[in-house]
Amino acid sequence: MEELQRILPRAPGVGEVFQLLRAEPRTRAQLVAITGQARSTIAARLDSLSEVGLIGQIGERSSAMGRPAASFYFRPDAGAVLAVDIGASHVRVGLTDLSVRILTESQVALNVEEGPEVVLARVIEIGHELLATAGIPASHLKGVGVGVPGPVTHSSGRPSSPPIMPGWDGYDIVGALQTAFGVPIYVDNDANIMAIGEHAMAWKDVPDLVFVKFATGVGMGIILDGQIRRGAQGSSGDIGHIRVPGGPPNPCHCGGTGCLEAVIGVPALLEQLTAAGRTASSGADIVSLVRSGDKAAMQVMRDAGRTAGEVLAGVVSLLNPSVIAVGGILAQAHEQLIAGIRESVYAKSLPLATHDLRINASIAGPRAGIIGASTLVCDQVLSPAAIEAMVDGTDAREGE
Amino acid sequence: MEELQRILPRAPGVGEVFQLLRAEPRTRAQLVAITGQARSTIAARLDSLSEVGLIGQIGERSSAMGRPAASFYFRPDAGAVLAVDIGASHVRVGLTDLSVRILTESQVALNVEEGPEVVLARVIEIGHELLATAGIPASHLKGVGVGVPGPVTHSSGRPSSPPIMPGWDGYDIVGALQTAFGVPIYVDNDANIMAIGEHAMAWKDVPDLVFVKFATGVGMGIILDGQIRRGAQGSSGDIGHIRVPGGPPNPCHCGGTGCLEAVIGVPALLEQLTAAGRTASSGADIVSLVRSGDKAAMQVMRDAGRTAGEVLAGVVSLLNPSVIAVGGILAQAHEQLIAGIRESVYAKSLPLATHDLRINASIAGPRAGIIGASTLVCDQVLSPAAIEAMVDGTDAREGE
């Protein structure tokens, strides 16, 4: 039957009618014309969607003489989403509506090495604070999206041997947050959610984009033919542990040597700066030094870009993306970083692959993660199937 | 409207009814039950499909007393496809039916450096010979699929600065073959069509697979979430020009140094064997030496595998495939090659990515290319949209 479902189109259900309104407001007559369905069928679907609060109505209901001219529209305030971006040394949490508009957000310094209990307790606390700030009851929450800085088994949402997240291996993040919030929880690698956020915000019409996160770790989210591609277990985009061609054999915490992350992750750059007599102890310090015009820091950043470019040239040969979006804390000093990347990539890739390639700083910037996490949740909880289940649930309760 | 077409399912048309029969034979009653359409609608669609010869009928048409019990089935002999695999030093052409069954095939030694006029003239000649051998009129041909050993701009089917195909840059392969055969022509990179062939033949249920071709050039076809991913211009999978981490700085014909192809392509391996006092002048010679148990050749092949594994470890980190299928002429000596690849990949990739990874010799083997080229054509000429156009074309002619 699954095969048949792939082959056979179905008549548009309430889920599809909702997608039409999610795209733009429409009148009953327009919906009848677009779907080819009976006026009574459309009316019943609109009733169901109104009942669960997902749509509203604007314009006159009807006038004594004329025809009804009401337009129906998607109500993004029908629910809220918590979007959580857990980094190596910070947590950013956003509360959004169902159109991924950020209502309120909060960022705190927090070391992921504190372990899942401490970090997730703080996330839950911040989540409730944000709901209170926005005056939104917890019952209004539709889902929580979470990005973490390590590989995640996609089917379970559990981190899998994440090198910079001691104590998190196999931890049941979904279970912990579900207990706290009672809604669907979606966990993904942070570079994946950043790629989703960058794509949704700035490059919707570009099918092939990669997002590189430069921070304590180095990671990548891959969008091909318009969709995030996670690979067989969900660990795709793990460029931090690709060996740099011609790079130094720095020992890496993964057990290997010469990994990109061991050469240009924040700790490696801090070592280089210390050796050059500079005082810096975080990615933000590096960014400040570069921005202040410190020559050594600028050189370190440019070299990091060149080194990253060695690996990214391989990514360009392999995936032929249209856009490389550069994000993460180090992208806040993106001029040197991107100049270095461009230098290597354009020198080492074949003409066809770089013909229309853009290498740009992330447009979503530090919010790429929470925008992506919210997008991930909204696309799930507003999918045609989810809408149909939601409406059926209401019907079922009515039948009791 | 395009957006609406994405959102809205349509009622099953003649194209979808055909897909149901392409999957397996079904009775009229089954089609009515599955599609939910009127018996008369289904009868009209079956008539259209019979008229263009795409389906046949088995079982009694009706019996005096009982109900009609006829089953309708897809007729793969309703058309034929030419599948062309152009390598650096050979051309293989297959004639298949519409279910990708090879009816007859031919392989000839031919150097791609002879240029497009010479090579395509030979392809056209072989194509007509195969049609004659199989007793199939040229009018029966539905399409031609072609793989070439270099990057192809997907939208035009033209090679784009292909390093090992002098004279082919920008050549209108589609135009040349269309003039000769008068049917749709599909051109793709050879590693892409091999990946499609390997996937269709042996790994249909595996969503994430990469196919590596080891020959004069080294290339890769990437299947993620069940589909070939060609990238923005169609040049994805170009691993031959990724620099080998820790590899020698061999000059490459692309202008770079240390490219995988410059280190383990057939010419590089021949140099190594010559230096070791062996006589070999082709990939087939290398394979013979390895098979004969020649120690130096076995060592060269094992080292080539290790070197390829350095780059493939990066591919595994980046794409997290379930299967790496190893093909191309050198895969005919796959034991040493694959042992070397495994050695590097398992040593250098993170646990999650290699957890369920299989590294295997291609199951489609030397036929991967023509099976893939035929699959590419069949999926296009038998798509729901193509079937609808075909049936409409008949209707239009009838109306004249």
Image (tube, coloured by chain):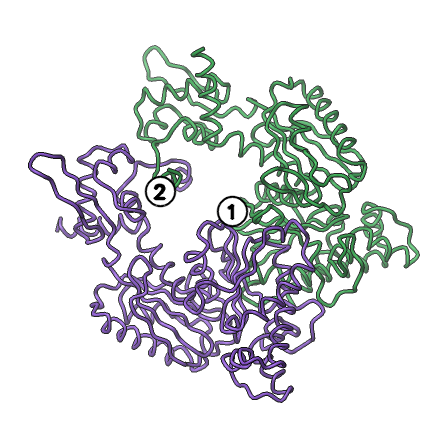
Chain colours: A purple, B green
Label 2: how many Cα within 10 Å (few below 14, some 14–19, many 20+):
some
- Residue B7, numbered circle: 2
The residues bearing labels 2 and 1 have C-alpha atoms spaced at a distance of 21 Å
Q: Nearer the viewer, residue A189 or B329?
A: A189
Q: Could you tell me residue B364's position as x and y percent? A: 65, 42
Numbered circle sitting on residue B204: none
Q: Is residue A97 left or right of residue A195?
A: left
Nearest the viewer among B317 and A132 is A132
Number of numbered discs present? 2
Q: Is residue A347 depicted above or below A36 in this figure?
A: below
Query: As drawn, which residue projects farthest toward the left?
Result: A64
Chain of residue at mark 2 = B
Q: Which residue is mark 1?
A: B226
Residue drawn at x 90%, y 58% is B275
Q: Picture coordinates of residue A213 (x, y %)?
A: 52, 68
Amino acid type indicated by mark 2: Ile
Circle 2: element type: helix
Q: Residue at x 54, y 52 (%)?
A: B208
Q: Are marks 2 and 1 in contact (CB under 8 Å)?
A: no
Which chain is disc 1 placed on?
B
Picture quadrant where residue A2 is located: top left
Q: Residues within 10 Å of mark 1 (few under 14, many from 20)?
A: some
Q: Residue at x 34, y 10 (%)?
A: B64
| Front: mark 2 or 1 | 2
Viewport quadrant of the N terminus of chain B: top left
User: What amino acid type should be assigned to the residue bearing mark 1?
Assistant: Gly
Asked which secondary structure carries label 1, the reply is loop
